[in-house]
């Protein structure tokens, strides 16, 4: 895991810029000044700790240069293929495999790899920069382009530092989107001219023509059937095989590996699969300071302990307290460079810090299980709403006769007539009514589509649970969950890996019918059945609770996203 930076802008200070993300790679640093372009890199040593594996890495003729952040999994067969084709390897790093794969297959080399990655390639032969972001969006990539200068980086702060003489203008529509979604959706950022590269996309910059091209290189195929049924036993065996394979591939490292064990289904499965392969698991679990009553449900360490007792592996427990939140509230700006309101980032930061203190540099997590296998209770609520929804004509008639003099037309349509808004409300998105004070302040037009991000991935032909899963997989997962974990774990120089998001496993799950994945509407039905003899029943069938702390921690009646905006961004440049 590392931090990367590259730019055509030669007036900037690359040393200062790459230092802003030094925590992403505290084990080494290199800046390479090339014709018309500079590439910079900071290294977190995980595989092949030798200097030969340092980046930027070049081809033998010094005409192709590569920097890369992430991990490629299961690439041994690809390496063997390349050796047979006459390529030599001087390291055991996956970086060199990527480099030689590009030399052999050209721009389409990405079809031959799987993993979490952002890859930057400078091909001097053709004067082009190629950027690739992994299919799911596990690793981040930001880029700046004003028609003349082009810069990319792992985090936005490196771009801002390199172009410190420039005054960046805020994008008010992005700020407004933050209040809708709790994050700024891709490809937007807080600033105009700075963008996020979307998952599964390739970006090509032509250094001579100063032209930028972007295209998607992978499309997830989704089963539109609700009732197709295959043999459950065979499907469960395949689920276990794919998860086991993914865990096995992601255990590869030349440094200590651990796991975050929340006490939920997904992290429990990952922990057990690690145990099956190594018979040793170093787990880390976070509890919370609670006041009894309903707050007890927030602390799930008892379930983590239940699993560790069954399989006899050690757990290090942390405890996130109210005082810690008060000290850390203003760190959002430091960690994310733009508004972000998933407050579970705070305990995730603390558990990452504890893992690093125990000399663990790689962590396997259960992230992605809810989006891939259908785990959020709001999916059931959404399905019920869609199933019981009155016809459009009845709603329109009701509006005309009763509500036209009570509610503005756009508010009535958003709340009741817009199919996407039904999903948005269950996904905790705010309506225009709830954001009224910001519409005028930010200059948002009456025709602005508040739910444009969800709408991009809304498919009416999918059955309700699958439809909701797919939207979350394309939006909430990369823009919130994976963003959160990447930033706060990397702040502690921890590489987090997500076995439940392997390409093969994702494609398998979304190729199932809704009934096969969630039989009789049971959330994570296929996953629970696959591990019913492995994971304690108390964990499999307990009510799902996200990794968050009690609302009383805030000492305020305001919603999180408004509190964090005021603490970190109001009246700040």
Image (cartoon, rainbow, N blue to C red):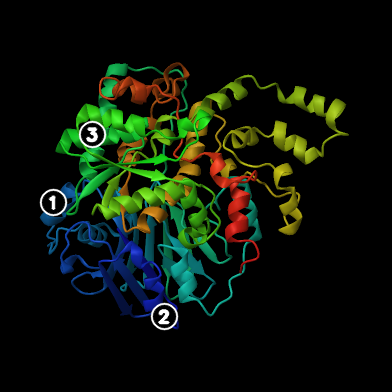
Residue linked to disc 2:
13
Q: Position of residue 207 (x, y in %)?
A: 42, 74
Identify the residue at the far right of this view.
Answer: 405
Q: Is residue 133 left or right of residue 400?
A: left
Residue sitting at 56 percent across and 41 percent down? 552
Mark 3–mark 1 CB contact (< 8 Å): no
Q: CA distance from mark 3 to mark 2?
A: 46 Å
Q: Quadrant of the N terminus?
A: bottom left
Disc 1 element? helix
Residue on which the image places disc 3: 273
Residue 564 % position (x, y): 58, 53
Label 3 or label 2, whichever comes before in sequence order: 2
Q: Is residue 518 above or below residue 242?
A: above
The foreground one among 328 and 46 is: 328
Q: Which mark is residue 80?
A: 1
Inter-mark Cα distance, 2 to 1: 41 Å
Please report the residue visible at 19 percent of the width from the left and 54 percent of the height from the top.
255
> Residue 374 appears at what percent x and percent y?
44, 29
In the rendered image, the residue lying farthest to the bottom is: 11
């Amino acid at each position: 895991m590392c931090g990367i930076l590259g730019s055509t802008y030669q007036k900037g200070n690359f040393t200062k810029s790459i230092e802003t993300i030094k925590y992403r790679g505290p084990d080494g640093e290199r800046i390479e000044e090339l014709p018309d372009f500079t590439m910079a890199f900071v290294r977190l040593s995980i595989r092949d700790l030798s200097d030969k594996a340092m980046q930027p890495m070049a081809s033998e003729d010094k005409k192709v240069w590569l920097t890369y952040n992430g991990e490629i999994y299961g690439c041994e067969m690809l390496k063997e293929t390349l050796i047979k084709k006459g390529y030599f390897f001087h390291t055991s790093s996956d970086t060199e495999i990527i480099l030689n794969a590009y030399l052999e297959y050209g721009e389409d080399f990405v079809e031959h790899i799987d993993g979490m990655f952002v890859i930057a390639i400078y091909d001097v032969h053709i004067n082009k920069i190629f950027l690739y972001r992994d299919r799911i969006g596990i690793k981040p990539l930001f880029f700046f382009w004003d028609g003349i200068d082009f810069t990319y980086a792992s985090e936005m702060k490196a771009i801002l530092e390199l172009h410190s003489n420039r005054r960046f203008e805020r994008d008010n529509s992005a700020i407004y989107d933050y209040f809708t979604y709790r994050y700024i959706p891709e490809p937007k950022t807080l600033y105009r001219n700075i963008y996020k590269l979307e998952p599964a996309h390739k970006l090509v910059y032509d250094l001579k023509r100063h032209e930028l091209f972007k295209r998607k290189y992978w499309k997830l195929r989704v089963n539109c059937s609700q009732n197709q049924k295959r043999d459950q036993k065979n499907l469960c065996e395949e689920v276990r095989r794919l998860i086991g394979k993914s865990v096995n591939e992601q255990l590869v490292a030349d440094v200590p590996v651990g796991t975050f064990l929340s006490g939920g289904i997904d992290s429990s499965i990952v922990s057990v699969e690690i145990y099956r392969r190594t018979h040793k698991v170093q787990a880390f679990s976070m509890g919370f300071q609670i006041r009894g009553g309903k707050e007890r449900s927030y602390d799930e360490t008892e379930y983590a302990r239940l699993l560790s007792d069954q399989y006899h592996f050690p757990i290090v427990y942390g405890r996130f307290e109210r005082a810690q939140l008060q000290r850390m509230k203003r760190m959002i700006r430091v960690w994310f460079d733009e508004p972000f309101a998933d407050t579970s980032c705070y305990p995730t930061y603390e558990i990452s810090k504890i893992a690093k203190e125990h000399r663990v540099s790689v962590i396997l997590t259960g992230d992605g299980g809810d989006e891939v296998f259908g785990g959020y209770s709001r999916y059931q609520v959404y399905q019920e709403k869609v199933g019981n929804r009155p016809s459009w004509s009845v709603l329109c008639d009701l509006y005309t006769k009763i509500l036209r003099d009570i509610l503005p037309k756009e508010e009535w349509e958003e709340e009741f007539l817009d199919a996407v808004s039904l999903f948005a409300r269950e996904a905790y998105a705010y309506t225009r009514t709830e954001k009224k004070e910001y519409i005028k302040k930010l200059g948002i037009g009456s025709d602005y589509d508040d739910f444009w991000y969800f709408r991009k991935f809304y498919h009416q032909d999918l059955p309700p649970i699958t439809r909701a899963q797919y939207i979350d997989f394309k939006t909430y997962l990369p823009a919130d969950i994976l963003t959160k974990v990447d930033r706060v774990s990397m702040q502690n120089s921890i590489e987090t890996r997500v076995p439940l998001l392997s390409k093969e496993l994702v494609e398998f799950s979304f190729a199932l019918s809704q009934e096969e994945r969630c039989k009789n509407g049971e959330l994570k039905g296929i996953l629970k059945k696959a591990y019913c003899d492995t994971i304690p029943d108390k964990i499999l069938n307990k009510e799902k609770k996200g990794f968050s702390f009690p609302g009383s921690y805030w000492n305020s009646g305001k919603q999180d996203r408004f509190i964090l905006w005021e603490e970190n961004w109001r009246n700040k440049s």
